[in-house]
Structures are given as C-alpha cells and as structure tokens.
Image (cartoon, rainbow, N blue to C red):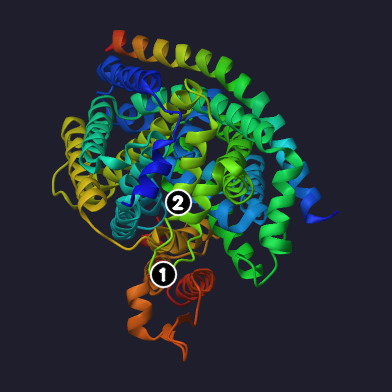
Amino acid sequence: MSWELLWKVVLIAVVGAFSLMAILVTILGARDIKKLLRKLRDEEDED
Amino acid sequence: MTDAVQSAFDQTNFGTADWVIVIVYLLISLGIGIMVKRYAGSMVNYIGAGRKIGPWLGVATMTGTELGLVTVMYSAQKGFTGGFAAFHIALIAGVATLFVGLTGFIVGPLRRMRVLTIPEFYEKRFNRKIRILGGFLLVFAGVLNMGLFLKVGSMFIVGVTGMASDGEALKWVMVGLLLLVLIYTTLGGMISVILTDYVQFVVLSFGLLAGTWIAISKLGWGTIFQTVHDTLGPAGFDPTVSDGSFGWEYVCWMVITAGLIGSAVWPTAVSRALTMESEAAVKKQYCWSSISFTVRFLFPYFWGICALVFITSMPAGADLKELFFSVEEGVEPLSNLYAMPVFMGRLLPPILIGVITAGMIAAFMSTHDSYFLTWSSVITQDIVAPLWKRELSTKARVKITRICIVLMGGYVLYWSVFYKGREDIWDYMAVTGGIYFTGAFVVLMLGVYWKRTSSFGALLGLLSGLLMLLGLEPIQKAVGLKVLNGAGEWREILTSPQIGLITVSIALVLTIAGSLLKPDTRKEAE
C-alpha cells in the first residue's frame, strides 16, 4: 500500500468514525449531564 | 501591516450574523458557570466534578480539552508545511489512546488510587518531597507552556474575522475572552468546565465535519492530493523521508509525545480520567476518545493542506501566494500560521463560519480553563497544602485555587499580549512541556509498574526533565548546540526530537539506577 493510499483510507475512516461518535456523544452525553446534575442536587439536599 | 495583507484579510465571509452567533455562545458559557456555582463547594467537586462523570460526557470533555485552538493552529501549520505526511502524528495519537483505553496504561491505576492530581500519586507512592518537587516542575513547565496560547488564539481570530486592521480592538477582545474564562472557571470549577466542554464538542464536531466536507467539495478530492504531490513531492506523503519535514527520529519522538504522553501523562488529559465515576468508565472514555485524539490532529492537518492547495493552485487564492511565499527581497513572508484561518474565512459561508468560529473560540477557552484549573489545583493541593504547617480547610483550598487562576490569567495576558517574543512558538511549547513530561513519563510508568522504584530514583528521573531546557534556542546557542556554518546560517547539532529522546533515555536510566543504588527503606516504603 502506498503512503498516499494509506492516508486516503485513514481520512475516510476517521471522518466516518467521528461522524458516528459525534452523534452518540451528543445524545448520550446529554443523558450523562442530566445524571450528573441529579447526583449533585441529591448531594446538596443531603447536606 | 501592508495594504496587500489588509486586503487579503478583508476578503473574509465573516459578518454581523457570525458575531451574533459567537456572542450568544459566549453568553451561554457564562450562564453555565453561574448556574453550577452552587455545586462547587467541596474540593472534590471543584477540581474533580465530584468524580461523577459518565463515559459519554467524559469523551466530550476529553475532546473539548484536547481539541484546543492552539492545537488546531499548529496542526494546520504542520499540514501546510508537511502535507499528508503529518497524518502519521494523528494516527500515532489515536492508536496510543486506544492502547491506553484497552489496557488502562497508567491512568487505570491512578484512578484506582483515587488521587486528584499526578503529584498526589507521587506522595502516595514515594513521599511528600517528591510530590512537592513534581508539583513544582509540573506547574513551572505547564504555566510556561501556556504562555503564548492567547497570542496564537488571537492570530486565528484575526485571520478568520478580518480584524487585522484594528490591533487595539483585538487586544480588548482577548481581554474580554480571558475575563469570561476566569469568571466561569473560578465560579464553577470543573463542573462548569465539563459542561462547557460538552457544548463545545457538539458545536465543533459538527462544524469540523461540515468544514471538511465543504473544503473537499470546493477544492476537489483529486486536486488536493495532486497539488500536494506537485508541491511537496514524496515527502508530502512519506513521514520517514529524512529530507522532508519529519524523518524516523521525529516519528519516534511522536510515539512518545503525541502518543503515550499526550494521552496518559499530560495532566489536563489525566485530570479528566480522574474525574470519571469508575476505572471501567475511564477505559471506555479512552477507547472512544482515541477517535477524537486522532481527529484533533487530523482535521486541522487536512485544513492546513487544503489551505496550501487553495493558495498554490486556485485562482481565488492567487493573491495569498505572494504573501505566504514572497520571493521579493526585503519582504518577509506572512506567518504561515495565518494560512488556515484566512483560507477558512474565504471558504466557509456566513453562519457556518460563525458556528465554527464560536466552536474554535470555545476550544480556545476550554484549553485555557482546563490549564488554569489543572495548574492551580496542583499549586494548591501539591505545593501550598503540603508546605502549610496546619491542615488547610476545603474553603481555603478552593479560595487559593481561585486566586491562582486569576494570577495565571494575569500572567497569560501579559505574556501573550505585551510580550514580543519570536514567532517559532512550536519549539518553545515542545521544550517547555518536555521539562515536565519527559521525567514524569518515566517516573509515572516505573512508579506504577515497577515495585522497586524508589524515591531517590524518582527524584533523579524528575530532575532529568530539566535537560529539555537545552532545546530552547538561546540556550542551544549559548552552549554550542546551535552553531553558525560557513554560509552564515544557524545549524542544529541536536534537533529538538533528538534532545527529547535523549532526555527520556537519561530519565529512564537514572530512575532505574537511582532506585537500585538507593532503594527506599521499609519505613519510607510504608
């Protein structure tokens, strides 16, 4: 495999993987934020 | 600034609507800081977000921290000068992060020990003196390292918005941004940093993908590769070519720096791992972050490459060719750091350019807040508290951390806005960072995985990082590592990657030798 072909494959693969990751992190990260704030609120109520 | 440069900068698509997008974004960031202030009462919450961060939010914050504007700017510059060969750094960073995610290399044991900072590990593993020394070296290197961030950030804003004509306005924008970062970091601590990192992730990730897509569609996939081939030859693709921008030594140095150190030793990345809710969450965070650790280099490299293609082969970029590759005697070429932002300013349509600029400013702020918080918490936890004769209350620790953040803000503002240093900032950053990470990498690795590592060995290992100072240009000239040749040009006897590799090797040898020669006594080990 030539270097040029390698970098073409890497670029396409990374763009694809990052697109998927961006969607997942956006949705599931929002869920994690909700959980974080709930835990912090519960902790505050206990104090 | 000449009329030609001013005219080139004025051709940006950045307009009023884009400014509105940026301002709204900044106000949201400020609002988040104020909103979560009430949760930042304890030290664990303030610098570790209560160790309650889930894996997906962890990936977002890791990306938000590591995808800084400074990284984007220098990476774009590397792509501009080195072509696709620079991609090897992105690949190494991604593979190394995946390795850390799969094995838990260094970060897994650190999270298990429930430490908040790396020097805290030094005390648990060695003794308090090593903690203080480690903390001092970390802060010394780290604060020096971020000294020029504001300047580089300003270069992006100048390039993309076309604000070049009004230098004073730019300074005030920088002051404003810095104040904003200081306010929400000092108020909300790590919780606000993580929440803004999430917003940054969403804005920037979709902006990066859209920008890349537009660049390919406007320039042409085949044209991009062909132009790099015509301009840089085989060295534009093969990183091992010694007469190109890299070579084997550089690749080896990148395995250590961009690879293992960037993911498992650099404190801002490690501090994110230490905020995670469990070791399993840390591993998951790193496995997914391997994509973003690749992206944070690869996309800016690609944008730098596209800037090169735009400037050298597109009629629309013809005026820029004269500026960046000036052959006129007595005319200095424009710093190629400006190439990517000027190119993006002309390529991206209004609104999208506002979104991407907001994301980039967010990246700029995110790096600042993380660095402020990491270094100031090390000063508080690992230098001031151990040296304090009495137990410091939580309230006092949070207060000291906040004061340190404000003082660092003053330093960064002074250094970036008023200090007129040399333009070659990348070498400066690599050397200053290396003062900490060359020694810390060895001491952390051996401290975690080799039981016989002693306090004396750790002391020698950490101090050997100071050898990286030999990579600084004035010191190189003073000690004869950089000499004038017959043609009156400066020639390096040892390059920065060579000095880095030698320093890591010396740190390794000294740590092992010191540990064998002077093992810890049973009392010390306990």
Q: How many marks?
A: 2
State the residue position of label 1: B468
| In-front residue for pair B23/B507 | B23
Residue type at mark 2 is: Leu
Q: Residues within 10 Å of mark 2 (few under 14, many from 20)?
A: many
Give the secondary structure at mark 2: helix
User: Same chain, marks 2 and 1?
Assistant: yes
Is B473 on the left or on the right of B246, as rendered? left
Q: Which residue occupies 69% across, 37% down?
A: A14
> Quarter of the image holding residue B354?
top left
| In-front residue for pair B164/B52 | B164
Q: Position of residue B81 (x, y in %)?
A: 57, 58
Q: CA distance from mark 2 to mark 1?
A: 25 Å
Mark 2 vs mark 1: give the one in front: 2
State the residue position of label 2: B337
Q: Position of residue B478 (x, y in %)?
A: 32, 83
Q: Position of residue B436 (x, y in %)?
A: 39, 59
B20 up-or-down from B130: above or below: above
Give the secondary structure at mark 1: helix
B22 up-or-down from B177: above or below: above
B223 up-or-down from B88: above or below: above
Q: Which residue occupies 56% across, 31% down?
A: B208
Quarter placement of the C terminus of chain B? bottom left
Q: Which residue occupies 35% across, 54% down?
A: B145
Q: Position of residue B486 (x, y in %)?
A: 47, 92
- On the question of residue A12 being in view, the answer is yes
Residue type at mark 1 is: Met
B66 up-or-down from B477: above or below: above
| In-front residue for pair B156/B521 | B156
- On the question of residue B100 being in view, the answer is no
Tell me the subunit letter for badge 1.
B
